[in-house]
Amino acid sequence: ETGVTQTPRHLVMGMTNKKSLKCEQHLGHNAMYWYKQSAKKPLELMFVYSLEERVENNSVPSRFSPECPNSSHLFLHLHTLQPEDSALYLCASSPNLGSYEQYFGPGTRLTVT
Amino acid sequence: AQSVTQLDSHVSVSEGTPVLLRCNYSSSYSPSLFWYVQHPNKGLQLLLKYTSAATLVKGINGFEAEFKKSETSFHLTKPSAHMSDAAEYFCVVSDANAGGTSYGKLTFGQGTILTVHP
Protein backbone atom coordinates (compact mmCIF):
# COMPACT_ATOMS: atom_id res chain seq x y z
CA GLU A 1 0.00 0.00 0.00
CA THR A 2 1.15 3.52 -0.77
CA GLY A 3 -0.12 5.26 2.34
CA VAL A 4 -2.71 7.24 0.39
CA THR A 5 -6.29 6.06 0.73
CA GLN A 6 -9.36 7.17 -1.18
CA THR A 7 -13.05 6.64 -0.49
CA PRO A 8 -15.33 5.61 -1.97
CA ARG A 9 -13.62 3.38 -4.53
CA HIS A 10 -16.65 3.46 -6.80
CA LEU A 11 -19.41 6.05 -7.08
CA VAL A 12 -22.44 6.31 -9.33
CA MET A 13 -24.33 9.58 -9.21
CA GLY A 14 -26.99 11.40 -11.14
CA MET A 15 -26.43 14.80 -12.65
CA THR A 16 -28.41 16.54 -9.91
CA ASN A 17 -26.72 14.81 -6.98
CA LYS A 18 -24.13 16.22 -4.61
CA LYS A 19 -21.38 13.91 -3.44
CA SER A 20 -17.85 14.16 -2.07
CA LEU A 21 -14.66 12.21 -2.66
CA LYS A 22 -12.24 11.81 0.22
CA CYS A 23 -8.49 11.36 0.23
CA GLU A 24 -6.28 10.74 3.25
CA GLN A 25 -2.52 10.41 3.36
CA HIS A 26 -0.63 8.79 6.23
CA LEU A 27 2.84 9.83 5.06
CA GLY A 28 3.29 13.18 6.79
CA HIS A 29 3.35 15.00 3.45
CA ASN A 30 2.62 18.69 3.00
CA ALA A 31 1.34 18.76 -0.59
CA MET A 32 -1.72 17.04 -2.04
CA TYR A 33 -3.13 16.80 -5.55
CA TRP A 34 -6.28 15.82 -7.44
CA TYR A 35 -5.97 14.28 -10.91
CA LYS A 36 -8.58 13.16 -13.43
CA GLN A 37 -7.91 10.07 -15.54
CA SER A 38 -10.27 9.70 -18.50
CA ALA A 39 -10.20 6.93 -21.05
CA LYS A 40 -7.67 7.50 -23.84
CA LYS A 41 -6.44 10.80 -22.37
CA PRO A 42 -3.35 11.60 -20.29
CA LEU A 43 -3.80 12.25 -16.60
CA GLU A 44 -4.98 15.80 -16.02
CA LEU A 45 -3.90 17.75 -12.96
CA MET A 46 -6.94 19.42 -11.39
CA PHE A 47 -5.89 20.99 -8.09
CA VAL A 48 -2.76 21.37 -5.97
CA TYR A 49 -2.63 22.15 -2.26
CA SER A 50 0.40 22.99 -0.16
CA LEU A 51 -0.01 23.27 3.61
CA GLU A 52 -3.78 23.49 3.13
CA GLU A 53 -3.53 26.37 0.66
CA ARG A 54 -4.59 25.94 -2.93
CA VAL A 55 -1.72 26.78 -5.29
CA GLU A 56 -3.15 25.54 -8.57
CA ASN A 57 -6.57 25.39 -10.11
CA ASN A 58 -6.00 24.01 -13.55
CA SER A 59 -9.03 25.55 -15.30
CA VAL A 60 -11.40 23.13 -13.61
CA PRO A 61 -15.16 23.84 -13.85
CA SER A 62 -16.79 25.16 -10.69
CA ARG A 63 -18.93 22.03 -10.35
CA PHE A 64 -15.76 20.55 -8.83
CA SER A 65 -14.94 22.15 -5.48
CA PRO A 66 -11.85 21.04 -3.51
CA GLU A 67 -11.32 21.35 0.21
CA CYS A 68 -8.19 20.74 2.25
CA PRO A 69 -8.98 21.07 5.98
CA ASN A 70 -5.51 19.89 7.02
CA SER A 71 -2.38 18.50 5.39
CA SER A 72 -3.58 14.91 5.74
CA HIS A 73 -7.03 15.23 4.18
CA LEU A 74 -8.28 16.37 0.81
CA PHE A 75 -11.86 16.39 -0.45
CA LEU A 76 -13.42 16.91 -3.84
CA HIS A 77 -17.03 18.08 -3.63
CA LEU A 78 -19.12 17.32 -6.68
CA HIS A 79 -22.42 18.88 -7.77
CA THR A 80 -24.44 19.02 -10.99
CA LEU A 81 -21.90 16.94 -12.86
CA GLN A 82 -22.10 15.98 -16.52
CA PRO A 83 -21.72 12.49 -18.05
CA GLU A 84 -18.34 13.54 -19.49
CA ASP A 85 -17.10 13.94 -15.91
CA SER A 86 -17.16 10.16 -15.56
CA ALA A 87 -13.56 9.14 -14.93
CA LEU A 88 -11.09 7.80 -12.40
CA TYR A 89 -10.20 10.51 -9.90
CA LEU A 90 -6.78 10.06 -8.35
CA CYS A 91 -5.40 11.72 -5.27
CA ALA A 92 -1.66 12.07 -4.69
CA SER A 93 0.65 13.53 -2.07
CA SER A 94 4.29 14.58 -1.95
CA PRO A 95 6.61 15.57 0.90
CA ASN A 96 6.55 19.19 -0.17
CA LEU A 97 5.56 21.28 -3.15
CA GLY A 98 8.28 20.72 -5.72
CA SER A 99 9.26 17.28 -4.43
CA TYR A 100 10.18 14.93 -7.23
CA GLU A 101 7.97 12.05 -6.17
CA GLN A 102 4.24 11.89 -5.79
CA TYR A 103 2.47 9.00 -4.11
CA PHE A 104 -0.89 8.03 -5.53
CA GLY A 105 -4.02 6.57 -4.03
CA PRO A 106 -6.05 3.83 -5.75
CA GLY A 107 -8.58 6.28 -7.15
CA THR A 108 -12.34 6.68 -7.14
CA ARG A 109 -14.14 5.39 -10.23
CA LEU A 110 -16.93 7.92 -10.83
CA THR A 111 -19.85 7.30 -13.16
CA VAL A 112 -22.31 10.13 -13.85
CA THR A 113 -25.65 8.99 -15.20
CA ALA B 1 7.10 24.01 -21.24
CA GLN B 2 7.29 20.26 -21.07
CA SER B 3 5.70 17.31 -22.82
CA VAL B 4 5.99 13.57 -23.08
CA THR B 5 5.25 11.23 -25.99
CA GLN B 6 4.89 7.50 -25.51
CA LEU B 7 5.47 6.04 -28.92
CA ASP B 8 3.38 2.88 -28.50
CA SER B 9 -0.13 2.68 -27.09
CA HIS B 10 0.09 -1.13 -26.84
CA VAL B 11 3.04 -3.51 -26.55
CA SER B 12 2.65 -7.27 -26.51
CA VAL B 13 5.44 -9.66 -25.52
CA SER B 14 5.83 -13.29 -24.55
CA GLU B 15 6.79 -14.24 -21.03
CA GLY B 16 10.56 -14.43 -20.68
CA THR B 17 11.29 -12.07 -23.60
CA PRO B 18 12.63 -8.51 -23.30
CA VAL B 19 10.39 -5.51 -22.78
CA LEU B 20 10.92 -2.10 -24.40
CA LEU B 21 8.52 0.78 -23.77
CA ARG B 22 9.49 3.94 -25.59
CA CYS B 23 9.27 7.51 -24.34
CA ASN B 24 10.44 10.81 -25.76
CA TYR B 25 10.28 14.06 -23.86
CA SER B 26 10.45 17.76 -24.53
CA SER B 27 11.59 20.22 -21.88
CA SER B 28 13.03 23.72 -21.81
CA TYR B 29 15.07 22.93 -18.69
CA SER B 30 16.90 19.96 -17.22
CA PRO B 31 14.07 17.47 -16.74
CA SER B 32 13.23 15.02 -14.03
CA LEU B 33 11.70 11.89 -15.55
CA PHE B 34 9.72 9.03 -14.12
CA TRP B 35 8.01 5.83 -15.06
CA TYR B 36 4.85 4.88 -13.22
CA VAL B 37 2.90 1.62 -13.50
CA GLN B 38 -0.83 1.16 -13.01
CA HIS B 39 -2.31 -2.28 -12.54
CA PRO B 40 -6.06 -2.73 -13.11
CA ASN B 41 -8.14 -1.03 -10.42
CA LYS B 42 -5.04 0.19 -8.65
CA GLY B 43 -3.37 3.56 -8.23
CA LEU B 44 -0.13 4.61 -9.86
CA GLN B 45 3.08 3.14 -8.47
CA LEU B 46 6.49 4.71 -9.05
CA LEU B 47 8.80 2.33 -10.93
CA LEU B 48 11.89 4.52 -11.21
CA LYS B 49 13.06 8.12 -11.46
CA TYR B 50 15.79 10.17 -13.09
CA THR B 51 16.76 13.41 -11.34
CA SER B 52 20.07 14.41 -13.01
CA ALA B 53 22.30 11.82 -11.38
CA ALA B 54 23.29 8.57 -13.14
CA THR B 55 21.78 8.30 -16.61
CA LEU B 56 21.02 4.59 -16.23
CA VAL B 57 18.37 4.25 -13.60
CA LYS B 58 17.34 0.98 -11.97
CA GLY B 59 13.86 0.59 -10.55
CA ILE B 60 11.70 -2.00 -8.92
CA ASN B 61 10.79 -5.40 -10.36
CA GLY B 62 13.85 -5.54 -12.62
CA PHE B 63 12.97 -2.50 -14.73
CA GLU B 64 15.49 0.10 -15.79
CA ALA B 65 15.58 3.18 -17.98
CA GLU B 66 18.30 5.20 -19.63
CA PHE B 67 18.22 8.96 -19.96
CA LYS B 68 19.62 9.99 -23.35
CA LYS B 69 19.75 13.74 -23.68
CA SER B 70 20.94 13.70 -27.29
CA GLU B 71 17.91 11.64 -28.27
CA THR B 72 15.52 13.23 -25.73
CA SER B 73 14.51 9.72 -24.76
CA PHE B 74 13.85 7.79 -21.58
CA HIS B 75 12.92 4.29 -22.69
CA LEU B 76 11.92 1.65 -20.15
CA THR B 77 13.37 -1.85 -20.44
CA LYS B 78 13.32 -5.19 -18.71
CA PRO B 79 15.38 -8.20 -19.80
CA SER B 80 12.70 -10.81 -19.19
CA ALA B 81 8.96 -10.17 -18.95
CA HIS B 82 6.83 -11.77 -16.28
CA MET B 83 3.08 -12.28 -16.37
CA SER B 84 2.73 -9.92 -13.41
CA ASP B 85 4.23 -7.10 -15.52
CA ALA B 86 1.01 -6.80 -17.51
CA ALA B 87 -0.25 -3.30 -16.74
CA GLU B 88 -0.33 0.24 -18.11
CA TYR B 89 2.89 2.23 -17.96
CA PHE B 90 3.20 6.01 -17.90
CA CYS B 91 6.23 8.11 -18.72
CA VAL B 92 6.19 11.36 -16.77
CA VAL B 93 8.22 14.58 -16.77
CA SER B 94 8.41 17.00 -13.86
CA ASP B 95 9.14 20.73 -13.89
CA ALA B 96 10.79 20.53 -10.47
CA ASN B 97 14.09 21.76 -11.95
CA ALA B 98 12.54 24.67 -13.81
CA GLY B 99 13.04 27.11 -10.96
CA GLY B 100 10.95 30.21 -10.45
CA THR B 101 7.35 29.35 -9.65
CA SER B 102 7.63 25.68 -10.65
CA TYR B 103 6.31 23.28 -8.07
CA GLY B 104 7.03 19.83 -9.43
CA LYS B 105 4.08 19.67 -11.82
CA LEU B 106 3.90 16.26 -13.44
CA THR B 107 3.06 15.92 -17.13
CA PHE B 108 1.96 12.42 -18.10
CA GLY B 109 2.26 10.57 -21.36
CA GLN B 110 -0.74 8.82 -22.88
CA GLY B 111 0.27 5.47 -21.43
CA THR B 112 1.41 2.15 -22.91
CA ILE B 113 -0.54 -0.99 -22.18
CA LEU B 114 1.79 -3.96 -21.81
CA THR B 115 0.35 -7.40 -22.47
CA VAL B 116 2.38 -10.49 -21.55
CA HIS B 117 1.51 -13.80 -23.20
CA PRO B 118 2.35 -17.16 -21.65
Image (cartoon, rainbow, N blue to C red):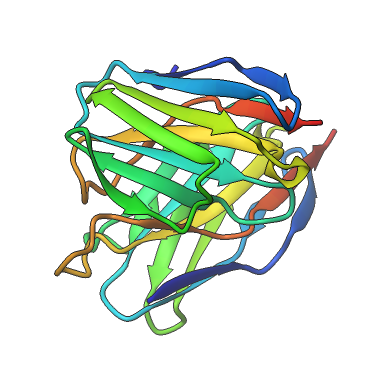
Look at 72% across and 23% down and name the residue there.
A13
Residue B80 visible in image = no
Q: Where is residue A103 in the image (x, y as percent from the top left)?
A: 38, 33
Name the side, left or right, on which B55 lies relative to A53: right
Residue B64 visible in image = yes
Report the front residue among B18 and A36: A36
Report the front residue among B21 and B17: B21
Report the front residue among B88 and B11: B88
Q: Where is residue A76 in the image (x, y as percent from the top left)?
A: 47, 30
Quadrant of the frame with the C terminus of chain A: top right
Look at 42% across and 63% down and name the residue there.
B66
Name the side, left or right, on which B93 lies relative to A113: left
**Residue A49's quadrant in the figure?**
top left
Q: Where is residue A20 in the image (x, y as percent from the top left)?
A: 52, 22
Look at 51% across and 23% down and name the residue there.
A21
The relative height of residue B112 versus residue B61 in the rendered view (above or below) is below
Quadrant of the frame with the N terminus of chain A: top left
